[in-house]
Amino acid sequence: MAEDLPWRTRLSCWRQTAVTGGRQYLEDNPPWITATAILPRAVLQTVFVMLLCQFVGGAQLRHYASVGAVALTLMLSTTAGIADVPTTDKGSGTFWRIRTGQLAPFTVFVLRSWPYPVIGFTTAVLTLVFVAPASGIVWLGPPLVPLLLCLALLALTTSAIGLAGAAFAVGRRADVLVGNLLAYLTMLSSAAVIPSGRIPWVDLLGNVLPMRHGLAAIRASQAHEPFAAQLGAELVVGAGWLAVAWILIRIQVHRARVSGHDDFS
């Protein structure tokens, strides 16, 4: 186990695992795929949401939804995409090598997941660059700094819930179903498009899912209001889902050791 290794060896294991994660991501998502599929989809999705809000509620609703529409593009790479990390080992029959290696499986999956929040954040920022001027919304100057900080945190928290969903589903081969379900629930409860206070149970759900507190922090920062509390709440939610992922992976490892195999369907 990693705690028994010298710290230099442990750092080397972490570094090599992270490098493997980057190579795996590039193998599954070459740069030309990101440039011609992921980014255009994010931009067009944002434009569609904003035009729909313009049609339904006018310029006021469009302006409200613009922040949420940009933030929702994160989940194309995080909540939905990050499931590829554990399911690749599951599908390849190499999970047993992960759980018998020097690093804990949870540590391996987290270290190999780093490209997903990075690409998600980059996609959201580029979408902002393309869409904001055309929509008449300008976030340049000092207001841009807290916006980028909030988007970076949202990339991490939506990755945490994506990893938790994958950890729950990987033993049942339902990663696509669970990942999409969590993504849709997060979108619905985030107040990205529909302002909070309209549907009580949606507001309650949003308090324990990523995105809602982070979007509230973005809107507060744009209004020059305090936003640290909302940012802290988003951080707590993300940490909670990361803990859920850790528990579920530990359960999977325990089941594998007890039963002697990793094929849980």
Image (spheres, rainbow, N blue to C red):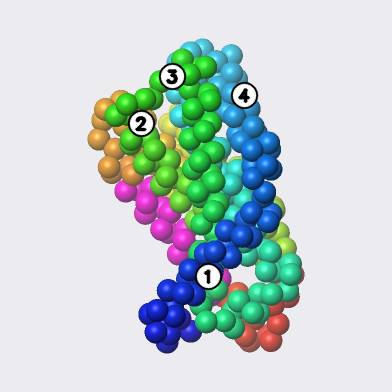
In which quadrant of the rendered view does residue 99 lie?
bottom right
Separation of marks 1 and 2 at Cα, in angstroms? 34 Å
> Mark 3 or mark 1, which has the lower sequence index?
1
> Mark 1 or mark 4, which has the lower sequence index?
1
Q: Mark 4 = which residue? A: 48
Give the residue displayed 48% in from the left and 22% down from the top: 132
Q: Indicate which label's residue lies in the foreground, 4 or 3.
A: 3
| Vertical order, 213 against 46 (above or below) | below
**Residue 58 at x, y = what percent?**
51, 12
Q: Nearer the viewer, residue 80 or 107?
A: 107
Q: Secondary structure at mark 3?
A: loop
Q: Mark 2 = which residue? A: 144
Residue 236 belongs to magenta span:
yes
> Mark 2 or mark 4, which has the lower sequence index?
4
Give the residue displayed 53% in from the left and 31% down from the top: 127
**Residue 178 at x, y = what percent?**
65, 54
Q: Mark 3 = which residue? A: 137
Identify the amino acid type marked 3.
Ile
Identify the amino acid type marked 4.
Phe
Rendered image: mark on residue 16: 1
**In the rendered image, is residue 220 in sight?**
no
